[in-house]
Image (cartoon, rainbow, N blue to C red):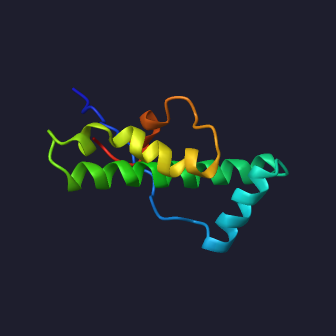
Amino acid sequence: MPKKIIKTKRKKSLKYKLSDNKYKELIKKKKNKSISKNQNKILENELNKKYCKCIKTLKKKYPKNSKTYKGKFGICMNSIYKNRGFEPPYNVSNLCKLYYSF
């Protein structure tokens, strides 16, 4: 009998690929609606990484029965997307499975 080959998915890297200056420049461009598709894709990936990292830190930091733990998705959504004036993507928290396994 041949052996079964089990493939495992590799998690994406959470390292930020943009410098602070480039990141801020892309945010300004998106607010002025003068951003290209490629730049927008790069910015969305960086925002998603920040969002997932925020959720993970709140999960680690607070106990499960605290209000902060239960509201972690809303807290991170406000701090990452809404405070910058952007509309969050649909079901963005499901994309965190690409980076973390929780």
Q: Position of residue 29 (x, y in %)?
A: 78, 56
Between 36 and 87, the residue placed more toward the observer is: 87
Residue 86 relative to residue 7: left or right: right
Task: Identify the residue at image location x=74%, y=54%.
Answer: 39
78 versus 18 height, above or below: above
The residue that appears at 65% across and 64% down in the rendered structure is: 23
Q: Residue at x 49, y 45 (%)?
A: 78
Residue 89 shown left or right of residue 72 in the figure? right
The reply, left or right, for residue 77 in relation to residue 100 is: right
Residue 56: percent from left, percent from top: 31, 51
- Farthest residue to the top: give it: 1
Residue at figure coordinates x 55%, y 52% from the top left: 47
Residue 70 horizontal/vertical position (percent):
26, 37
Q: Quadrant of the N terminus?
A: top left
Q: Nearer the viewer, residue 68 or 5?
A: 68
Name above or below for residue 20 compared with residue 74: below
